[in-house]
Amino acid sequence: MLDALAKPKLLSLDDLLKLGKQNEIINGQVVQKSASGILHQLVSQNIYHSIDLYLSQLDLGVIFYTGLTYLMFSDSKGLKNSFVPDISFIRLENILPMTHNSKPYPGIPDLAVEVISPGEDADDIQTKLRTYLDKGTEQVWLVYPTTKELHQYRRDNNPEIRIYRGSQKLDLADLFPNFELTTDQIFTIPEWALR
């Protein structure tokens, strides 16, 4: 009877690497990332390019486009959480030493941006959001391309949420001083993609 109640064995880092980069681990369970469409990609690019352009003129940190796996301070022998945000940012002073820079990042991002696709599980999104903030991520943005909304969660205001829609300027002073990013910039889609 006790065997039935035992916790499932967590995957190791080697097990995760064998699965490929489109997998995340949420509360010890492997979750395959959902496929994204053109709208998802265009909105992600708008955010990435705007922040990357700003950072190219300052030495604040590094922004990553989709594909970087964060181990979220999990023990690499047993991964409880391992996330692949669409966009992420790490401050220079928070970059952890890495013995193998070809493997997933052992820590957390300072900013995690999740662009939500129609097929994503709401419970998984909320679990990831709480885990990011609990582990120390400063801000998490949940971006909804279809409704043109950005939900900004800040660790210092946890659990307060700020919802941006229409033509609004995001409050980014803590992460990116003197940088302006608007919802119009994020959700502008080229004419060819609207046909």
Image (tube, rainbow, N blue to C red):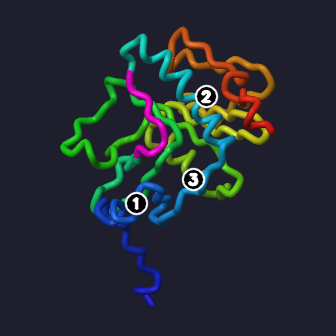
From this viewpoint, which residue is outermost toward the top?
Answer: 178
The percent position of residue 32, horizontal first and vertical second, equals 52, 62
Residue occupying image coordinates x 33% and y 48%:
104
Establish if 57 lies above or below 14.
above
Question: To which residue does mark 1 refer?
Answer: 20
Q: Which residues are magenta?
A: 61-68
Badge 1 or badge 2: first in the primary sequence: 1
Q: Secondary structure at mark 2?
A: helix
Q: Nearer the viewer, residue 114 or 27?
A: 114
What amino acid is found at the position of numbered circle 2 in the picture?
Answer: Asn
Left or right: 165 as drawn, with respect to 178: right
Q: Residues within 10 Å of mark 2 (few under 14, many from 20)?
A: some
Q: CA distance from mark 3 to mark 1?
A: 22 Å
What amino acid is found at the position of numbered circle 1 in the picture?
Answer: Gly
Image quadrant where one finds the C terminus: top right
The percent position of residue 125, horizontal first and vertical second, equals 61, 51
User: Which circle marks residue 110 in the picture?
Assistant: none
Residue occupying image coordinates x 68% and y 35%:
151
Question: To which residue does mark 3 refer?
Answer: 127
Establish if 46 lies above or below 22.
above
Establish if 168 lies above or below 193.
above
Q: CA distance from mark 1 to mark 2?
A: 26 Å
User: Which circle marks residue 46 in the picture?
Assistant: 2
Badge 3 or badge 1: first in the primary sequence: 1
